[in-house]
Amino acid sequence: MSYLAGKELRIVGFLCNWCSYGGADTAGVGRFKQPTDLRIIRVPCSGRVNPLFVVKALLNGADGVLVSGCHPRDCHYSDGNFYARRRLEMLKRLLPFLGIDERRFHYTWVSASEGARWKNVVTDFTKAIHELGPFHQKEEKTECS
Amino acid sequence: MRVGVFICHCGNNIAGTVEVAKVAEAARMMPGVAFATTYMYTCSEPGQEEIKEAIKREKLDRVVVAACSPRMHEVTFRRTVEKTGLNRYFFEMANIREHCSWIGEDKELNTNKAIEAIKLAVEKAKQNKPLFPAKFKINKRVLVIGGGVAGMQAALDCADGGLDVVLVEKSPSVGGMMARLDKTFPTVDCSICILGPKMVDVSQHEKINLYAYSEIEEIKGYVGNYQIKIRKKATYVDWSKCTGCGACIEKCPSRNAFDYFNFGVAPARAINIPFPQAIPKKAKIDAQFCRQFIKGKCGVCAKFCPVGAINYEMKDEIVTEDVGAIIVASGYGLIDLDKLPEYGGGRYPDVISGIQYERILNASGPTSGHIERPSDHAEPKTIVFVSCAGSRDKSIGIPYCSNFCCMYIAKQAILTKDHIPDSRSYVFYMDIRSPGKGYDEFTRRAQEEYGVQYIRGRVSRIYPKGKKMIVKGADTLLGTQVEIEADLVVLATAVTATTDARTLAEKLHISYDPHGFYVESHPKLRPVETNTSGVFLAGACQGPKDIPASVGQGSAAAAKVLSIFSKDTLESDPQIARVNTNICVGCRKCIGTCPFGAIEEQQLRDGRIIANVIETVCAGCGICNSTCPCGAIQLQHFTDNQLLAEVNALCLT
């Protein structure tokens, strides 16, 4: 069983438990309609996301990866999202060297109360990935490849 | 491995947009899944019984429930699983409601998404290891931040329950906003007469240790064992000697200090006691207005103090308190009049805020309860109240209702008529919101008994003409423009979070909404809890709230603290980092990144230095895990293998 070819692309999201996962819940409770492509993996903190998870996902078949944590200074574990920001920003710059369009990866901050914001994040990112098309069916053209 | 999958219909919440039977069929095909079924309400008692029976009957060793958010029911189902003798961490949850059925419109896509969510959970569950919590002792003392009515109620309830309470109040006296009010709606009770006894109780209770004029400097630790640093701000008056006689205030030559308590309605002295019923009733010097500090010479108060309490050399002092739980009752702020230029806020002295008018009405206020307008101290005969001054106004970033303005305007209009029988009051309103017990009767009374004229519409402009203020607005019920010549205009300014609310939240590791109000765990079912265990909310720091609601929350927060303190030990969360001593090379990177200082060096018998996690300090964020270059340190329940299993479940197939 896989994603529905032609209708969906494969988007993986890593969401921190305290803010963004809660924000996605809030969006659900508020019935903010979203595209269905995203599959969510819950992590305790965005600082738990090893950049290699993102790379692994993209190389193994994902068309896009989204990481979302608490807003800077609002981390449940005080500094986790600062570590995340530094690592993920580096990753973003590294992706073209791996032959991956950096627009396939996005990181952002959504708090548990921001249901409407979460809807926008998902909608915009899904739209961006659909514009890029499926990753593994064509040669990605990046500046470095 | 035998995984059982239980798919919840949640009535129509899930089954309405997800074909649950199809999902169950697909789940049965997944490798490792021995059993899959659907149920109407899995969280109900029979639903949980079904899980327990299936575990025994099918000899299941992993359980996946596909239902609502794990933030909602993970704890519930972990308990269910544990009752059958399985380790509670052999349970996983797939969120097919909030993240699937409620947000997707296409049934086919939703069904497919639900299947994948289950596949992810099954793969994770197969990797799960048994984990066992440790027990630790708790410190049965509680910190209450804020000495307003909510904080005092919480402190008194905790203290009456036998707990030691540390109460920290930022201003020089407890009482908060309620102490500033003249009367309270809808009973027109005298505010300080009902609050005063509570303030006295707080100061006299042997279990309550009050730090007035103090702020929270630093918070460390976790539920059961917090270390708090409190900054006692310098008052320049030795409070152990000060008797509150007021001799210093009478003689103080600096008479133009800003009066924080009265919101600047009248000037104060540089050395002052905020109000007659202040607790503690001790003087303090506002250094930015004091001649001794500005010019380097004066010393009048020191000369006249009969007990020699004045000490210009005093410095801030940091004290440390250890507590086990924290109640946050830091209250609210009000939008500045300057932010409302269309009403002339901040420019015209006779346009004032509701709280300023409250001080003018108050018998212990600067005018001794005689209503006079600020510009020429004349008695106003025509008074216009403007509700929603800033509230429900997206253009200035305050889309919410400030909750209690409609009610206090009605109260102030009634009191105005009582004070000045030949006065006329007008209220511009958007809607009259009076949903509390006895509230609607009260606003009706203002209109019918006291003749207050309510005009439905907004004010467009306020400007001076001679000694009058011209209020231009619309009456949307009559469809006409109105213009009123007023002597005094009172704006019901919007309630905001306090200016330092965000800083305090960051110290507490609790979250706040875009307006700075603190976020509760669940808006309906966990209204006073936060997502940080051991930290509770009370009063308007969580959102605009009137007195009964704040008092109720204060008591609720106290009850929550008493309930966690009814045990002597708490169970620690075993989802913490653990070091594989065989792999760790002792690079110490994790020690540097841990935000909690939970990792220390440890020397093995063979002399090798490796990392060691202090179990009670680790909060389980996993930052060390993604820092470790060799994967030696692993966050239990969220190990690399577990997360990669989820990634692979999604991507490789």
Image (cartoon, rainbow, N blue to C red):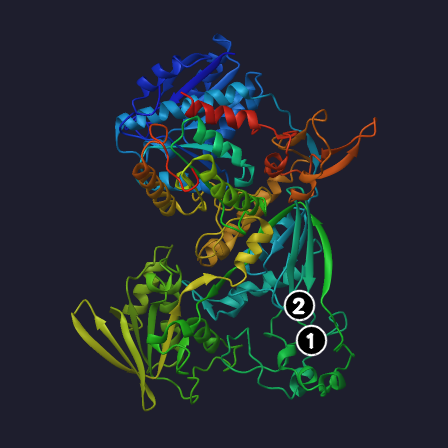
Report the amino acid beneath label 1.
Answer: Gly
SS under mark 2:
loop
Circle 1 crowding by C-alpha within 10 Å: few under 14, some 14–19, many from 20: some
SS under mark 1:
loop
| Image marks 2 and 1: residues in contact by CB distance under 8 Å | yes
Residue indicated by mark 1: B244
Residue indicated by mark 2: B280
Q: Which residue occupies the foreground of this view, B185 or B471?
A: B471
Query: Looking at the picture, does residue B366 appear above or below residue B233?
Result: below
Q: CA distance from mark 2 to mark 1?
A: 9 Å
Image point (36%, 63%), residue name? B391
- Relative placement, left or right, of B514 versus B107 is right
Q: Which residue occupies the foreground of this view, B504 or B198?
A: B504
Image point (66%, 68%), residue name? B280
The quadrant in which the C terminus of chain B is found is top left
Q: Say which mark, if any, is on residue B531.
A: none
**Which comes sooner in the sequence, label 2 or label 1?**
1
Say which chain tag 2 marks.
Answer: B
For the question of whether residue B209 can be seen, the reply is: no
